[in-house]
Image (spheres, rainbow, N blue to C red):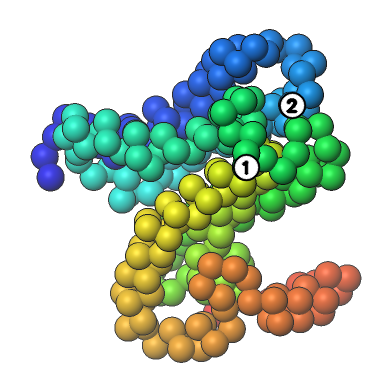
Amino acid sequence: VQGPFTVRQSINLHKLLVAPIYVAMIWYFGGDLSLRQTWGPAAAALLICHGTYGFLWVYKDIYFPDASWTQATSVLGFISCFVYPLGFYYTPMLCLVSPWFHFSSFGIGSEPWILAAGLWFYIVGMFYHYCADLQKHVQLAFERPRRLITTELFAHMRNPNYFGEIMIYTGFAVLSMNWLPLVIFAAVWLQLFVPNMLAKEASMSRHAAWKDWVARTGLVYPWLPSLLKEFCANALSKKSSVAHAGAA
């Protein structure tokens, strides 16, 4: 595909616009940055969490990029990518502050335990998403000969970066106090994430270590029996005994 842009430019523009678009939504629907409205606590959390995630995504793309995002795209492709699926990721704040979506809300934006749940999903997701992408980038760049990445964050699931992103956006959906973003996100994940993961599975299955890795990992969620076993065995031990990248 030939074109004046790359996919990463559309994605990065979307990420950088999260904070200003969220502020514009708050103002448009009668709020202000004092956030004294009933939905103020959730709006503050969404603005900071989603805005920070967007900035860190661009930072990640600059310093440990995913080569697949450098695919060329046309002007129409750039706009199409920005509108769908990326545009739908702005819905958490819209559903929180707009009166248009009260029919699907499950909170008003000030419930402490809903806020805590949203932040828990976000924090866990940020850890997995960014750490997994960094681990993959470093191992692919420096490990020779290349082999399956089956250690550290990949020891208990085969797609920790996708898991992290799902957790992050689940957190945003919870902070929106509305079911609609979660439904929208789930539809996007089923359409885009699942085919990508299955294609990657087919590609990786040629490796000799594949069957053993599959037996002790989940596709996109941690395989809890092996995770809990290793965690309990190593949490308070003098030294971790789990396998690490580069170990003989």
- Residue at left 27%, top 36%? 80
Q: Amino acid at mark 1?
A: Ser
Is residue 181 left or right of 242 when viewed as pictured? left
Which quarter of the picture shows residue 19? Answer: top right
Could you tell me residue 62's position as x and y percent?
A: 42, 36
- Judged by depth in the image, the label closer to the viewer, 2 or 1, is 1
Of 48 and 137, nearer the camera is: 48
- Helix, strand or loop under label 1: helix
- Residue at left 49%, top 47%? 184
Distance CA(mark 2)–CA(mark 1): 15 Å
User: Which disc, if any, is residue 56?
Assistant: none
User: Is 110 situated above or below 33?
Assistant: below
- For label 2, the crowd category at 10 Å Cα-Cα, with few meaning under 14, some 14 to 19 and many 20 or more, is many
- Determine which residue is flagged by label 1: 104
Is residue 121 left or right of 137 when viewed as pictured? right
- Determine which residue is flagged by label 2: 39
Of 22 and 109, nearer the camera is: 109
Asked if residue 168 shows in the view, the reply is: no
Could you tell me residue 33's position as x and y percent?
A: 70, 12
